[in-house]
Image: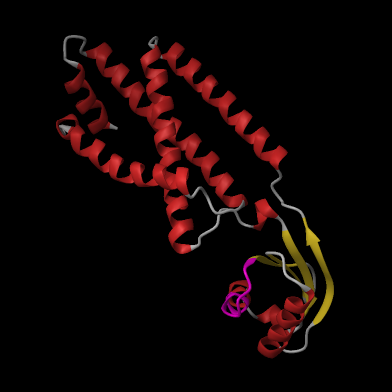
């Protein structure tokens, strides 16, 4: 059995070293949204050479030439959709010139301004659903373990994990220019589910050990439960 609880001060210290800068960054700088949240320009082009080249290579070429590209995806035979931050007609001409220079003859199919993929209403509904889920988790865990403290602890662990992810991306956004997009929302929801799942697995083992050895103190029970988990 590993004496995990003996070093709980170390876990709090490591957690604090990650959380404090992240929370500070979230309050001061926030998260850096991509065009999935802000909207931008959509360009569809036709180029026969691009079919043999990777989308990432194409994206890298555009970014080296000063264009902030959100995504590049195929939209049919030799057709490609480029989503990027708003650009002017002059910048669009420069972009097409860059593509022709690097990848050969290019034909523009369309050039238009588009709204955000993730609108305010969608994000609001996602937030409401997340809060309802948290209340459900709190109620379920408190009922299943016959103790409200378990439910509160599960929610605190959930908030901890979400703040770690959001805080790190806030710092990366400020110092490295990394933006959050639709996948970030997916990552947050995935983190929520795994966080609660892992917490409940450990709690269930603690409850099982308490039933088997009711006279053993909580710290020893937790050490045994986590070791076995």
Where in the figure is residue 133, as x and y percent of width and height?
56, 26
Is 211 situated left or right of 74 in this image? Answer: left
Give the camera-side residue of 56 and 227: 56
Magenta-tinted stretch: 60-69
Where in the figure is residue 227, as x and y percent of width and height?
23, 33
Is 190 situated left or right of 38 in this image? Answer: left
Magenta segment: does it hold 64?
yes
- Name the image colouring: secondary structure
In the displayed structure, 59 sits above or below 227; it is below
Instruction: Name the residue at 21% across, 26% down.
Output: 224
Q: Residue furthest front?
A: 28
Magenta segment: does it hold 141?
no
Instruction: Name the residue at 43% across, 35% down.
Output: 195
In the displayed structure, 220 sits above or below 80; it is above
In the displayed structure, 196 sits above or below 108; it is above
Where in the figure is residue 10, as x and y percent of width and height?
19, 39
Quadrant of the image containing the N terminus: top left
């Amino acid at each position: 059995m590993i004496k995990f609880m003996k070093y709980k001060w170390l876990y709090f210290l490591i957690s604090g070293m990650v959380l404090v800068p992240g929370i500070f960054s979230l309050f001061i700088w926030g998260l850096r949204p991509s065009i999935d949240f802000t909207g931008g320009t959509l360009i569809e082009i036709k180029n026969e050479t691009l079919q043999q080249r990777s989308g990432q290579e194409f994206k890298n070429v555009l970014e080296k030439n000063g264009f902030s590209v959100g995504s590049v995806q195929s939209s049919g035979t030799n057709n490609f959709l480029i989503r990027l931050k708003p650009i002017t007609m002059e910048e669009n001409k420069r972009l097409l010139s860059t593509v022709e220079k690097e990848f050969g003859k290019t034909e523009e199919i369309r050039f238009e301004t588009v709204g955000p993929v993730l609108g305010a209403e969608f994000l609001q509904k996602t937030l409401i659903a997340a809060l309802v889920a948290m209340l459900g988790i709190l109620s379920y865990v408190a009922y299943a373990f016959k103790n409200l403290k378990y439910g509160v602890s599960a929610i605190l662990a959930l908030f901890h994990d979400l703040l770690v992810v959001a805080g790190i991306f806030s710092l990366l956004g400020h110092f490295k220019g990394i933006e959050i997009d639709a996948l970030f929302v997916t990552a947050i929801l995935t983190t929520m589910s795994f966080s609660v799942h892992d917490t409940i697995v450990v709690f269930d083992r603690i409850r099982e050990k308490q039933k088997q050895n009711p006279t053993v103190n909580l710290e020893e029970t937790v050490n045994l439960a986590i070791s076995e988990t």
